Image: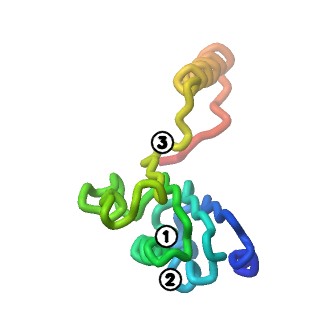
């Protein structure tokens, strides 16, 4: 990550995968380099954010707000400070636990995609384009 952009960025969007190299990459040191009043959005993996450091910089005013779709512990425990209005006003924090991608047409689009892939496999013997080897 090129940290030179952090002091200039109004919005930082994290879309990092979960790897040893991205573990807690957004920590106290990195958040302290953010532009004062910046917004932080994480739609990648919760493991990339040190949540105590994020909360510290939200409460201290370095960050104006945050939108989080992922968390270190999922589901986000009820006792998490992110749920506590007295810790941080809801106006400065948007929580969308694995729901940021939901749209009105998502179910229909997913069903159409599934049918298209299944039809190709059954009728033409073609494997799906995206296979996951578990």
Residue 71 visible, this angle: yes
At x 53%, y 35%, the residue is 102
Q: Mark 1 or mark 2, which has the lower sequence index?
A: 2
Would residue 14 appear left or right of 18 to someone viewing this image?
right
Q: Mark 2 or mark 3, which has the lower sequence index?
A: 2
Estimate how packed mark 2 is, as few (under 14), some (14 to 19) or many (20 or more) residues with alpha carbons within 10 Å.
some
Q: What element carries label 3?
A: loop
State if disc 1 and disc 3 touch (CB < 8 Å): no
Estimate how packed mark 3 is, as few (under 14), some (14 to 19) or many (20 or more) residues with alpha carbons within 10 Å.
few
Q: Which mark is residue 99?
A: 3
Q: Mark 1 or 2, which is nearer the eye?
A: 2
Give the distance between the C-alpha atoms of the residues marked 2 and 3, in whole angstroms.
Answer: 27 Å
State if disc 2 and disc 1 touch (CB < 8 Å): no
Front residue of this view, candidates 132 and 106? 106
Instruction: Identify the image's colour scheme: rainbow, by chain, secondary structure or one colour.
Output: rainbow
At x 66%, y 20%, the residue is 120
Task: Tell me: residue 18, above or below residue 131.
Answer: below
At x 52%, y 61%, the residue is 66
Whole-percent x, y for residue 17 in the image = 57, 61
Would residue 48 appear left or right of 5 to someone viewing this image?
left
Whole-percent x, y for residue 64 in the image = 55, 66
| Residue identified by numbered label 2 | 28
| Residue identified by numbered label 1 | 49
């Amino acid at each position: 990550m090129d940290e030179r952009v952090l002091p200039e960025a109004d919005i930082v969007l994290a879309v990092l995968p979960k790897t040893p190299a991205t573990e807690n990459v957004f920590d106290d040191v990195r958040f302290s380099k953010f532009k004062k009043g910046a917004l932080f959005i994480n739609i990648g993996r919760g493991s990339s954010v040190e949540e105590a450091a994020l909360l510290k910089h939200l409460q201290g005013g370095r960050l104006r707000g945050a939108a989080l779709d992922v968390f270190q512990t999922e589901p986000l425990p009820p006792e998490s400070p992110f749920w506590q209005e007295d810790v941080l006003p809801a106006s400065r924090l948007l929580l969308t636990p694995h729901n940021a991608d939901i749209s009105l047409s998502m179910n229909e689009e997913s069903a159409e995609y599934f049918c298209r892939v299944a039809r190709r496999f059954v009728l033409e013997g073609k494997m799906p384009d995206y296979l996951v080897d578990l």
